[in-house]
Image (cartoon, helix red, strand yellow):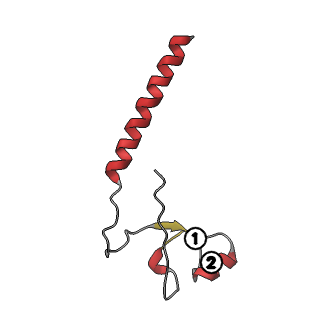
Amino acid sequence: MKKKAARFTTAFFIGVLLVASGLGLAVVPPVPGGSLPNIVLPIPSKRAHRQYLGLNGTGTFKIPQIKAKVVIVEVFNMY
């Protein structure tokens, strides 16, 4: 039983390291003064939220499609 737990723990941490290292290579922070990458977001299901953003229909949208003079995007770095 202890061997199974040790194998599972080892495999789990190896998996976490592989995923974390792959994510670290794929994510490049925006350059100061540069443009945001094309971020695709789901169109909200609530009508009031779609109206607030100036969106119609269903599916996805990109930030430039928001009907506003200014869009503020706050970026959090949690890790």
| Amino acid type indicated by mark 1 | Ile
Q: How far is disc 1 from disc 2 in space, using C-alphas?
A: 7 Å
Give the side of residue 76 with respect to residue 58, left or right.
left
Give the side of residue 49 with respect to residue 41, left or right.
right
Label 2 SS:
helix
Q: Tell which circle, 1 or 2, labels the residue nearer the N-terminal end.
A: 1
Q: Residue at x 69, y 72 (%)?
A: 46
Q: Which mark is residue 50?
A: 2
Picture quarter with the N terminus: top right
Q: Give the image quarter of residue 30.
A: bottom left
Q: Residue at x 47, y 65 (%)?
A: 75
| Residue 7 location (% of width, % of height) | 47, 18
Mark 1–mark 2 CB contact (< 8 Å)? yes
Q: Give the image quarter of residue 49.
A: bottom right
Q: Which residue is mark 1?
A: 43
| Residue 19 location (% of width, % of height) | 40, 40
Most foreground residue, 75 or 54:
75
| Residue 39 location (% of width, % of height) | 43, 67
Q: Residue at x 45, y 57 (%)?
A: 77
Of all residues, the one furthest to the bottom in this rendering is: 69
Label 1 SS:
loop
Q: Is residue 79 above or below residue 63?
A: above
Q: Residues within 10 Å of mark 2 (few under 14, many from 20)?
A: some
| Residue 13 location (% of width, % of height) | 44, 30
